[in-house]
Image (tube, rainbow, N blue to C red):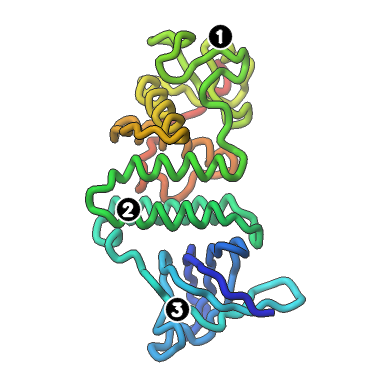
Amino acid sequence: MRHRQPAICLRAIDYSETSQVLHFLTRGAGTVRVLGKGTKRPRSKSGGAIDLLSEGQLLFSTGRAQGLAVLLEFTETTCHSALRKEASRLNAAVYMLELISAMLAEGDPHAEVFDLLHNALGRLGHADAPVQAVLAYFQWRLLRHVGLLGQLSTCVGCGRAIAGQGRGHRHHEQVFFSSTQGGLICAGCRHTAGEKLPLGPQTPQTLAGLAALAAAETGKKVPLADRRARAVNRMLAYHVAQQIGRWPKMAKYAIGHQAGMNTDKHG
């Protein structure tokens, strides 16, 4: 059966001297793995080797048996060359690809996630776009789309308001995030969670960043400063790592996560 879909290349692996195995995110068919026979030849239908971040129209064929689909044609519309010119933008983009590859089941359509990635890559291509803010919005919305965002405005233990500068939040209070519990935890409820990340000195920046992201979801235009965006990104990267069972390889390049961000399993 033939399928034609808008697609973004998530991963490209050399299969032979002339062929590639390619992972694509498509808008209507989810993530797919295809064998691109002869794609590395300059005169191939794709115009040469397909690289990650390449976006365009993908024509592929699937059979009855599970396995690699076959690439029939790929017409590139953009390779996102603008974001490739700056390491921080490229690192953020590749980190986005890694998250999608790790968090979406193959063949499970998520049109909203395709649109999210398409828009985020386009935004990163603008020289004035704040990289950490773009990445924070991406991580937030990706986790929301896959149902893993969690409870980020109140304590998952007692339900008390904790995010931002609400009446229930004390400025110097210890705050934690637990991936397994699914959200923020106040100091009073810290013993109810085994796995948890202390937000530590980054607590004010993280909470302010979360409040800005929540406000943006309601249509309000709230600026997200770099320090706040980076603090949120570190917490959400930790959440992703707990969900997929490993630290994303690109996290240290895209966000600069530190080995010191250890879980608090005993306190």
Q: Is residue 188 visible?
A: yes
Instruction: Tell me if residue 40 comes above or below residue 255 in the rendering.
Output: below
Q: Is residue 17 visible?
A: no
Q: Where does the image place residue 109, in percent across and percent down from the top left? A: 63, 58
- Label 2: element kind: helix
Distance from the alpha carbon under mark 1 to that under mark 2:
40 Å
Please report the residue visible at 38 percent of the width from the left and 10 percent of the height from the top.
171
The reply to whether callout 1 and callout 2 are in contact (CB within 8 Å) is no
According to the picture, the residue beneath numbered tag 2 turns out to be 124
Task: Work out which residue is located at the far front of the displayed protein and give it.
Answer: 219
Instruction: Tell me if residue 16 comes above or below residue 92 in the rendering.
Output: below
First along the sequence among labels 1 and 3: 3
- Dot 2 alpha-carbon crowd within 10 angstroms: few under 14, some 14 to 19, many 20 or more: many
Label drawn at residue 75: 3
Q: Where does the image place residue 105, in percent across and percent down from the top left? A: 64, 55
Q: What's under tag 2, amino acid-wise?
A: Leu
- Dot 3 alpha-carbon crowd within 10 angstroms: few under 14, some 14 to 19, many 20 or more: some
Which marked residue is nearer to the observer: mark 1 or mark 2? Answer: 2
The reply to whether callout 1 and callout 3 are in contact (CB within 8 Å) is no
Q: Nearer the viewer, residue 99 or 111?
A: 111
Distance from the alpha carbon under mark 1 to that under mark 3:
56 Å
Q: Quadrant of the N terminus?
A: bottom right
Q: What's under tag 1, amino acid-wise?
A: Gly
Distance from the alpha carbon under mark 2 to that under mark 3:
22 Å
Q: Quadrant of the C terminus?
A: top right
